């Protein structure tokens, strides 16, 4: 589970940096990157919630 | 009039009669017992499993099931975003539909991923054939199968034994697609084609009307899309007008087939549980509770639509067909009212009439169907939502008789109750907080800034998303968040929802309200399965009795009434009192 979360967050960081730094002039690409990051963050929370429910 | 009512009764009874053998078949599929489809699908499934290196004999714990479920959904989310953001240059786009904006793609991708299909676009102009087939229709199959597979895990966990391993998720998932959804979808699509729905990849057709005007008519692979749209309780239409569109729902026969198709699996999953666990009486109790709730919503709605709009009656206009505003004459007021409640109760969210035009109390009943979200509910997830209420009722029942709460031989303790409460409270939390924020913005007519920029490049004001003032406008916003949180997908319409504020806020509500109510019940079932099985005794609370059924119904009504009554009072009830 931890491995998966690390992979997810790595994706999030990489995509964000690529879009925000190199494509910041393109409005649509920036918004796409942010929304992909939001989606990945939601999934990361959902993965984590499995552990929370087990330990609740 | 009698013929119309007879049509409604035939639809309901026909669904019930078909769902019992289907439930038996589903139970056999999940129990890996021999079924007639083995010969056709065994080789195909083996090919899939071999290619993906999945060993179906390797059973999973509840945590592994959920990790597998979330992982494949994450991949599909990225795939759907790719399709929607790039459809402009991808193939199979004869009508040259543009790629979706990022916020609309975010909403659409999540919406189809979570079996909701809350469409903030019109299918004929907002999605290419590539997106419709390989993006959206694909998600309609797999999202339905995801819910069914999760329900199968819970069925397995409810067996009267102590276990950690609860079958293989991929096995349940693929069999849901190949053995259940695919064969029935082919049957439904065939009826649609014979009745006149298009099934083509050619672009728009051009016709000349009797007046001599030239009209471009959108078409596409509609018949296949409509089949899984209903069977999987997805609800997303190929066209913007959904099942009110004559090419999507050509006549009364297709209306009946689509109606039965959307209710049959939610019915059948309850009976499947009964056959799977050999507890048919429990299945009938659960189905009975769901049906009492459904009838309590649908009968007043049909009655309200039957009597027409009193505001029109005050003008001296006769309404012999009932309240026909926003309804198709080929379906009539009764069948439309039945559809509106069925589609909101079972989380399909397809429409054959405009919900915005229904009488206020009918609108309230649609909202209540989604607020309770387990009077049948969606494929698989309807049973999971019901299971949460069942655990709550077991706990309350146990406390009332002064004994440790037990369900099917397993003690229900604090941990399970905490999870059940989180799941039960998440739904009203997401709906009411979302509606409160939107209402606050509308009440102050706030400038939306980046969250809504108009076609002239200037920021729009919040009230511009409302086409109706006062209570009805409030109902529109309440309905949108309720539909998102219930993963229903129907719209009250009249709400300008294709802007970043609505696309992103409902997108986040959609994703949380889909997966937490799956993770919670599977976790409860997994934790209970791990516990020592206690044989039934004279003091055991028996779940397969009418008394226990009434207790579950009371728990549902109390939770829905306490959580949602104030919001309903501000919307449809206030509107009704003002008529």
Image (cartoon, helix red, strand yellow):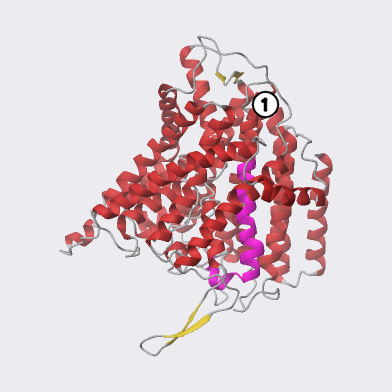
The residue drawn where x is 63% and y is 40% is B29
Q: Is residue B44 above or below residue B60?
A: below
- Where the C terminus of chain B falls, by quadrant? bottom left
The residue drawn where x is 41% and y is 58% is B255
Q: Is residue B39 within the magenta segment?
A: no
The residue drawn where x is 53% and y is 74% is B219
Q: Is residue B223 above or below residue A6?
A: below
Location of residue B133 in the rendering, given as x and y in whole percent from the top left corner: 63, 65
Q: Residues within 10 Å of mark 1 (few under 14, many from 20)?
A: many
The residue drawn where x is 63% and y is 43% is B515
* Residue B570 falls left or right of residue B194: left
Location of residue B325 in the rendering, given as x and y in whole percent from the top left corner: 31, 63
Q: Which residues are magenta?
A: B120-149
* Residue B249 falls left or right of residue A25: left
Location of residue B39 in the rendering, given as x and y in whole percent from the top left corner: 68, 47
Report helix, strand or loop for mark 1: helix
Whether residue B411 is visible to the viewer of this picture, yes or no, is: yes
Whether residue B495 is visible to the viewer of this picture, yes or no, is: no
Give whichever of B503, B327 is nearer the camera.
B327
């Amino acid at each position: 589970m931890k491995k998966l979360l690390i992979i997810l967050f790595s994706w999030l960081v990489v995509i964000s940096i690529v879009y925000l730094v190199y494509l910041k002039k393109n409005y649509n690409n920036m918004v796409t990157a942010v929304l992909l990051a939001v989606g990945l963050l939601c999934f990361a929370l959902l993965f984590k919630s499995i552990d929370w429910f087990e330990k609740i | 009039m009698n013929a119309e009512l007879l049509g409604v009764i035939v639809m309901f009874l026909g669904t019930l009669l078909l769902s019992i053998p289907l439930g038996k078949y589903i139970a056999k599929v999940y129990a890996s017992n021999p079924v007639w489809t083995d010969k056709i699908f065994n080789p195909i499934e083996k090919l899939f499993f071999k290619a993906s290196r999945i060993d179906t004999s390797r059973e999973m714990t509840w945590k592994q099931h959920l990790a597998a479920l979330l992982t494949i959904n994450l991949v599909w989310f990225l795939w759907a975003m790719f399709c929607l953001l790039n459809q402009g240059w991808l193939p199979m786009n004869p009508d040259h539909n543009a790629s979706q904006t990022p916020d609309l793609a975010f909403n659409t991708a999540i919406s189809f991923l979570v079996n909701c299909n809350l469409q903030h676009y019109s299918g004929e102009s907002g999605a290419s054939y590539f997106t419709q087939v390989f993006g959206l229709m694909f998600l309609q199959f797999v999202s339905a199968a995801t819910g069914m597979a999760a329900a199968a895990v819970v069925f397995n966990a409810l067996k009267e034994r102590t276990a950690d391993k609860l079958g293989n998720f991929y096995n349940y998932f693929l069999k849901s697609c190949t053995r259940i959804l695919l064969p029935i979808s082919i049957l439904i699509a065939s009826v649609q084609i014979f009745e006149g729905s298009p099934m083509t990849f050619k672009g728009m057709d051009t016709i000349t009307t009797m007046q001599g005007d030239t009209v471009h008519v959108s078409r596409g692979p509609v018949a296949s899309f409509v089949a899984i749209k209903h069977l999987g309780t997805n609800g997303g239409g190929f066209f913007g007008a959904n099942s009110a569109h004559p090419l999507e729902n050509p006549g009364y026969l297709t209306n009946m087939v689509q109606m039965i198709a959307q209710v049959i699996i939610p019915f059948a999953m309850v009976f499947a549980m009964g056959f799977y666990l050999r507890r048919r009486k429990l299945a009938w109790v659960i189905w009975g509770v769901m049906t009492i709730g459904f009838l309590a919503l649908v009968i007043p709605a049909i009655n309200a639509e039957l009597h027409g709009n009193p505001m029109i009656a005050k003008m001296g206009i006769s309404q012999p067909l009932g309240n026909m505003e926003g309804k198709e004459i080929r379906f009539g007021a009764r069948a439309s009212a039945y559809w509106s409640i069925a589609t909101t109760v079972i989380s399909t969210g397809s429409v054959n009439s405009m919900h915005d035009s229904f009488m206020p109390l009918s609108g309230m009943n649609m909202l209540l169907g989604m607020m309770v979200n387990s009077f049948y509910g969606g494929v698989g997830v309807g049973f999971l939502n019901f299971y949460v209420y069942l655990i709550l009722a077991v706990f309350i029942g146990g406390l009332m008789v002064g004994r440790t709460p037990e369900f099917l031989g397993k003690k229900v303790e604090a941990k399970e109750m905490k999870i059940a409460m989180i799941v039960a409270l998440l739904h009203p939390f997401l709906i009411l907080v979302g509606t409160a924020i939107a209402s606050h913005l509308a009440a102050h007519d706030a400038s939306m800034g980046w969250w809504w920029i108009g076609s002239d490049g200037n920021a729009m004001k919040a009230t511009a998303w409302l086409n109706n003032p006062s209570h009805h406008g409030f109902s529109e916003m309440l309905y949108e968040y309720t539909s998102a949180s219930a993963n229903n997908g129907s719209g009250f319409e009249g709400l300008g929802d294709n802007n970043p504020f609505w696309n992103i806020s409902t997108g986040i509500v959609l994703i949380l309200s889909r997966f937490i109510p799956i993770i919670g019940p599977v976790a409860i079932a997994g934790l209970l399965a791990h516990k020592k099985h206690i044989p039934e005794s004279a003091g055991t609370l028996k779940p397969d009795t009418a008394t226990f059924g009434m207790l579950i119904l009371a728990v549902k009504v109390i939770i829905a009434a306490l959580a949602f009554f104030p919001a309903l009072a501000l919307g449809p009830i206030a509107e009704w009192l003002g008529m």
